[in-house]
Image (cartoon, helix red, strand yellow):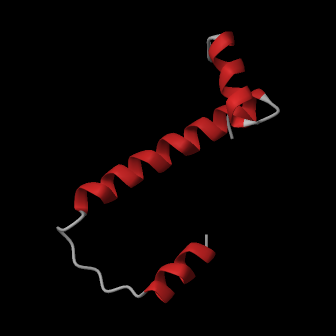
Amino acid sequence: MPRMMVEIDDTLLEEARRVSGTRTKRATIEAGLRELVRRRKAGELARLVGKVEIALTPRDLRAMREGR
């Protein structure tokens, strides 16, 4: 992975680290990026509710969740 230099507000980064429970700046930034991606994907799914028919059983969903 390439290294990059970015300027991040120290106060914001420290607050994010504290609320996320991460120990390092890198872990805090990665956790924030993962959360952003998760929320955007969830939003996309929410917009599709009622528009797409998917035949999944509770067992199928459980298997998908455990396969993460």
Residue 5 in view of the camera: no
Residue at 40% from the left image edge and 54% from the top image edge: 42
65 sits left or right of 57 in the view: right
Residue at 31% from the left image edge and 53% from the top image edge: 44
Residue 23 occupies which quadrant of the picture? top right
In the orientation shown, which residue stands out farthest toward the right? Answer: 23
In this rendered view, identify the residue nearer to me: 2 or 46.
46
Quick one: quadrant of the C terminus? bottom right
Q: Is residue 12 above or below residue 20?
A: above
Quick one: quadrant of the N terminus? top right
Return the x and y of residue 53 as percentages of the image width and height: 22, 78
61 sits left or right of 45 in the view: right
Q: Is residue 59 above or below residue 29?
A: below
11 sits left or right of 61 in the view: right
In this rendered view, identify the residue nearer to me: 59 or 28.
59
Residue at 77% from the left image edge and 36% from the top image edge: 22
Return the x and y of residue 59 as percentages of the image width and height: 50, 88
Residue 11 in view of the camera: yes
